[in-house]
Image (tube, rainbow, N blue to C red):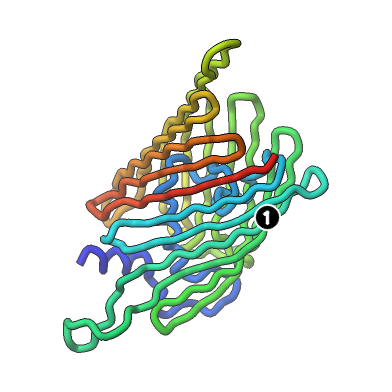
Amino acid sequence: MRRVILLSALLSGAVAPSRLAAQAPPSAALWRVAASSLALPPALTAGVAGTFWNPGALGQARGLAVGAHVFHTSDVLGMSGVLLGGSLPLPKPVRAGVLLGRVDIRDLVRTTTSPDANEGSIPVYTQFVGGNVVVSTGPLAAGVALQLHEARFDSENASGLTLDAGIRLRPVDRLLIAASTHLLPIDFSAQPTTDYFAGVEYTAWDHRPAEGLAAQAHVRYGVAYQPDGTVEHLMGIGAELADQIVVDTGVASEAGIGERIWRPSVSLGLRFGGYTVALAHGLGANDVGGTFRVGIDIEFR
């Protein structure tokens, strides 16, 4: 029963989706479940997959970059997804990239007048393919991303276009400020699938001795706003050791059904040269299980 309630909330409107091509299909809201595995504000994410949350995420990269992130939820939701992409430098200060992703829900059985399942399952998915361009100059990186979305809920299909923008600004060495739109319709209309992200990170401790291990500690705050007036907050801390081990933790305060709930998340990253492997877990809330994420980002320098 809990799964039916959750899917109804996430996919409200998806049974009779809008045919307008100027917006993401309603089921694109499923990407908010994938975002629950982020242990830092979405606007502050980095790497190729990070350009999905902030098109300016790769502004400081120097060479060819590729990435792949896989999401998976508990059986309560039965959702899985993937983000794949690449980015390469163009004549300075421009770089361009491509990104594609898909989220689907498995094991939705089909019934008629009997509680017994019929053959076959109900297909539910949302997917996209898009390109992004980012320009970097000094402490500022600004990017835009155009994405074509397609979704299916049983026999219903929908498609649409979104155009997002994002910035990352480092006014001083220890301070990072970022903001972005997510799934913004190309006609700039207010749609329930759109998010507006902002985040700030401050390096509270930066220890780089002449000999020994370097270490850093960061504090972060982020906010996400949705057109229906929902405001979500995320607070967290992060630590880096020897520029190889990265640990991030965060707690999000999000709107639940009739109440405000707290959702913790944690991420462990390991860097080896230009390789970064990340393992993350959003612990979920209200007994609905968590979201797991495994990702790899590679930068060829």
- Location of residue 152 in the rendering, given as x and y in whole percent from the top left corner: 45, 76
- Asked if residue 224 lies left or right of residue 131, the reply is left
Residue under the image location 34 percent in, 56 percent down: 73
List the single residue furthest toward the bottom.
113
Categorize mark 1 by other alpha carbons within 10 Å: few (<14), some (14-19), many (20+). Answer: many
Identify residue for label 1: 97
Say if 291 sits above or below 240 in the image: below
Say if 233 sits above or below 14 in the image: above
Q: Tag 1, which secondary structure?
A: strand
- Location of residue 216 in the rendering, given as x and y in whole percent from the top left corner: 51, 23
- Location of residue 19 in the rendering, given as x and y in whole percent from the top left corner: 53, 79
Q: Nearer the viewer, residue 103 or 29?
A: 103
Say if 36 sits above or below 130 in the image: above
Position of the C terminus, as image quadrant, is top right
- Location of residue 89 in the rendering, given as x and y in whole percent from the top left corner: 75, 47
Residue under the image location 40 percent in, 35 percent down: 249
Q: How many marks?
A: 1
Residue under the image location 53 percent in, 53 percent down: 68
Q: Nearer the viewer, residue 222 or 205?
A: 205
- Asked if residue 299 lies left or right of residue 16, the reply is right
Q: Amino acid at mark 1?
A: Gly
List the single residue furthest toward the front.
272
List the single residue furthest toward the top.
210
Position of the N terminus, as image quadrant, is bottom left
List the single residue furthest toward the left.
115
Residue under the image location 23 percent in, 87 percent down: 112
- Asked if residue 151 lies left or right of residue 60, the reply is left
